[in-house]
Image: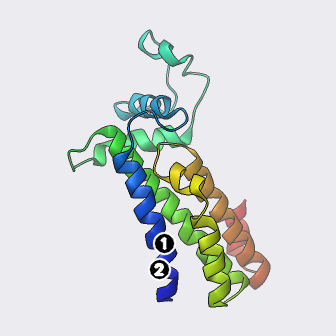
């Protein structure tokens, strides 16, 4: 199992490097994602209303993203004194790492071969886009985490006939 730590460490290093060393607005729609998350920071509401300040990016009352709401609520956990952009990027590194760990668990449900698990991990980690998006503010990381969790639940249900996993899929 120590061999499986090497792709994970490579991924964490690359994603943290992107998160900490790249400039603002490098990623696709990153400034909009940060702006929308900051709208949810100081409100308890799930649904926002349109105001003059929110019209810069369009109507906010028509779009609700769970990702922006979660980021906005987690902004209060920023106890490190770093900027909101860096903090949101580090949260995204955590989301992407969690989806990678779920992928490893799902692959272990398919095969226990260390060579297979290494191949799956390196196959995902060496995709430059995956590391790049993991270090930026993008809702793709949350989407990948939810998809990975649903695949793991499906594999558990299919392989072990686990009814709780089936209910988790619903």
Q: Residue at 43% across / 34% down in the picture?
A: 34
- Residue 81 against residue 94 in the figure, above or below: above
Q: Residue at 68% across / 63% down in the picture?
A: 150
Q: Residue at 55% across / 44% down in the picture?
A: 139
142 sits to left or right of 36: right
Residue topped by disc 1: 8
Q: Quadrant of residue 72?
A: top left
167 sits to left or right of 130: right
Q: Which residue occupies the foreground of this view, 167 or 119?
A: 119
| Residue 78 percent coordinates (x, y) | 27, 47
Q: Is residue 108 visible?
A: no
Q: Which residue occupies the foreground of this view, 96 or 10?
A: 10
| Residue 80 percent coordinates (x, y) | 21, 50
Name the image quarter holding the C terminus. bottom right
| Residue 88 percent coordinates (x, y) | 39, 45
- Residue 85 against residue 102 in the figure, above or below: above
Residue topped by disc 2: 5
Category of crowding for the residue at label 2, using alpha-carbon neighbours closer than 10 angstroms: few (below 14), some (14–19), many (at least 20): few
* Residues under numbered marks 2 and 1 in contact, where contact means CB atoms less than 8 Å apart: yes
Q: Quadrant of residue 38?
A: top left
Q: Residue at 39% across / 49% down in the picture?
A: 19
Q: Secondary structure at mark 1?
A: helix
The numbered mark at residue 50 is none
Tally of numbered discs: 2
Q: Secondary structure at mark 2?
A: helix
Q: Is residue 89 visible?
A: yes
Q: Which residue occupies the foreground of this view, 11 or 107?
A: 11
């Amino acid at each position: 199992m120590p061999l499986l730590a090497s792709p994970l460490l490579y991924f964490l290093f690359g994603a943290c490097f992107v998160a900490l060393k790249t400039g603002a607005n490098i990623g696709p729609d990153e400034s909009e994602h940060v702006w929308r998350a900051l709208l949810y920071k100081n409100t308890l509401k799930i649904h926002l209303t349109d105001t003059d300040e929110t019209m810069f990016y369009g109507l906010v009352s028509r779009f609700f993203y769970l990702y922006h709401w979660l980021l906005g609520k987690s902004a209060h956990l920023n106890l490190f004194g770093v900027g909101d952009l860096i903090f949101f990027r580090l949260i995204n590194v955590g989301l992407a790492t969690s989806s990678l760990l779920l992928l490893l668990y799902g692959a272990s449900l398919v095969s226990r071969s260390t060579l297979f698990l290494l191949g799956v991990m390196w196959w995902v980690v060496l995709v430059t886009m995956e590391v790049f998006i993991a270090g930026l503010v993008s809702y793709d990381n949350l989407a990948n985490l939810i998809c990975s969790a649903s695949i793991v639940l499906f594999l558990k249900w299919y392989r072990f006939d686990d009814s709780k996993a089936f209910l988790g899929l619903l």
